Image (cartoon, grey):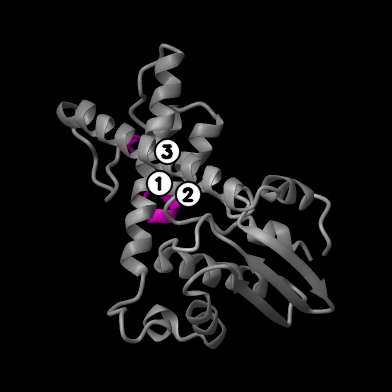
Amino acid sequence: MNVLAALGTVRDPELDEPITELGFVSEWSVDGGHVVVRLRLPTYFCAPNFAYLMVADANDAVLALPGVTSADVKLEDHFAADAINAGVADQTGFVGAFPEQAVEELTELRMTFKRKAYLASLDRLARKLDREGKPLPDTLGELADCAERTGLLRRRADLGLSCDEAAPLLLDEYGEPIPVARSALKLRFARAVRVSVDGNAAFCRGLLTTRYPHGAQHADTYAGGRG
């Protein structure tokens, strides 16, 4: 079973990057059908809602692997770790984990960051075409294969937006076509979102490296794996 690959499907909701590449997976092992995973974050005070989503997603990802019968996924070195770990283990949801503070689950929060991730990917594509001196095509089918196209399609799929070849390329984050008259303004907004996402990711990497000086080295060793 490839536990690391499964954990690589789990993304920080705000940074839109795999937790494995961010260095958030500090330890993982397999004993028969039982998987142990330990997660860490850049600071002791990282937002509990984001932390909860990552721990819950990591738990779901490893439990979905063939041959896995049980999982012990825990967040460490975080002020709300006990509540988050208990909530995920008991499947009580975010409200159950924080009954006196949380008033709703995190579905809308997750969608908000999926929309931001989509806009950031749209800007990455637009910048690539601009560097190559090419205009934005009207449809997805007119767009040549490239990493930016693949990233855009994945994020469109995450939002339930059409990925058909005939679908308009310029859709807003809610799936509505962007009129030509508004495209420049919308793309500027997408650029601002992308700069924010990339900036936060770089900031968090720096904080994690400061907190765990050997974090990057740890992440690199995962390719060799233990399970």
| Magenta-tinted stretch | 156-169
225 within the magenta span: no
> Could you tell me which residue is drawn at 59 percent across and 67 percent down?
58
Q: Which residue is mark 2?
A: 16
SS assignment for the magenta stretch, majority: loop
Q: Quadrant of residue 110?
A: bottom left
* Side of 77 where 201 appears, left or right: left
The answer to whether any part of residue 166 appears in the image is: no
Could you say which is closer to the camera, residue 154 or residue 107?
Answer: 107
Between disc 3 and disc 1, the foreground one is: 3
Q: Which residue is mark 1?
A: 117
Report the amino acid beneath label 2: Asp
Report the amino acid beneath label 1: Ala
Q: Is residue 9 above or below residue 165?
A: below
Q: Which residue is mark 3?
A: 199
Give residue 16's position: percent from left, percent from top: 47, 49
Q: Name the element at disc 2.
A: loop
Residue placed farthest to the top in the image? 133
Give residue 192's position: percent from left, percent from top: 30, 34
Give residue 225's position: percent from left, percent from top: 81, 57
* Side of 108 where 185 appears, left or right: left
Q: Are marks 3 and 1 in contact (CB under 8 Å)?
A: no
The answer to whether any part of residue 63 appears in the image is: yes
Between disc 3 and disc 2, the foreground one is: 3
From the image, which quarter does the N terminus lie in? bottom right
Q: Are marks 1 and 2 in contact (CB under 8 Å)?
A: yes
161 within the magenta span: yes
* Side of 10 where 38 appears, left or right: right
From the image, which quarter does the C terminus lie in? bottom right
Give residue 104's position: percent from left, percent from top: 30, 77
Report the amino acid beneath label 3: Gly
Q: Is residue 125 above or below residue 31?
A: above
